[in-house]
Amino acid sequence: MTEPTHEEAHTGALGSRLNWLRAAVLGANDGIVSTAGIVVGVAGATGDRSALLTAGLAGLLAGSMSMAAGEYVSVSTQRDSELAALALEKRELRDQPDAELEELTGLLEERGLSRAVARDAAEQLTARDPLQAHARVELGINPDELANPWHAAWASFLAFTAGALLPLLAIVLPPADWRLTVTVVCVLGALVLTGWTSARLGAAAPRRAVLRNVAGGALAMGVTYGAGSLLGAAGV
């Protein structure tokens, strides 16, 4: 009999890591598309390097801070809800231990165990750590791994910044005649990579994800470039 692999033995931890990787890829993808739309739109109106750098840097900072703040608020709300649920469960275990044992038995029965086996399992889990047992089985929460809003905020900030740097550098570093071409090629190439990576992390077929990603990025750049060209032609 072969030994289980590390991934097979820790599927919960592996799933958590994959969720963080997917979030990082999507954050980088947002940085690429939003910043590319800004700098390409400005490039449609002016070829001034300072204007492009200012617009791109402003978009990078605004986007990364917005992503970080939004993720912090969202995950803080999730953490508050988890803590409140755990506090309620702790009170119920203190005040109604028999009812909570019966509830745990019923939940295990719903998962396919016979009444006798479910009761025995519930008693063993309760004897070891009743709060941990109810948190995992009833609430679907691991009390030792609650959501961390600071981790989420920093991850979103760094992922968005990493993605946004690509179009920013691509628009300001090349010679004026090559800026737009280099930016479009770099952005579309990066979107192919992020689309493929997100699909693979989600165990999905990459072709459709890549096409969606590239089409969305190309549309964003096309729209903003058109708008910038119209404003530039109008002397705005």
Image (tube, rainbow, N blue to C red):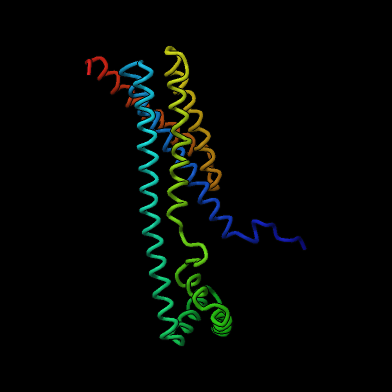
> Is 2 situated above or below 111?
above
> Is 141 situated above or below 210?
below
Q: Left or right: 11 with respect to 166? A: right
Looking at the picture, how far across and down is residue 213, in whole percent?
A: 45, 35
Looking at the picture, how far across and down is residue 191, in whole percent?
A: 48, 33
For this rendering, which residue is in front, 67 or 210? 67
Looking at the picture, how far across and down is residue 163, in whole percent?
A: 46, 35
Dividing the picture into quarters, in which one does residue 61 lie?
top left
> Is 175 situated above or below 2?
above
Dividing the picture into quarters, in which one does residue 99 lie?
bottom left
Q: Left or right: 66 with respect to 139? A: left
Instruction: Name the outermost residue toward the bottom.
Output: 98
For this rendering, which residue is in front, 164 or 44? 164
Looking at the picture, how far across and down is residue 208, in whole percent?
A: 48, 38
Q: Left or right: 183 with respect to 4? A: left
Q: Quadrant of the N terminus?
A: bottom right
Q: Quadrant of the C terminus?
A: top left
* Residue at image location 44% in from the left, 39% down from the top: 160
Instruction: Name the outermost residue toward the right.
Output: 1
* Residue at image location 28% in from the left, 23% down from the top: 227
Instruction: Name the outermost residue toward the top.
Output: 177
Dividing the picture into quarters, in which one does residue 214 lie?
top left
Q: Left or right: 81 with respect to 205? A: left
* Residue at image location 25% in from the left, 14% down from the top: 233
Q: How many marks?
A: 0
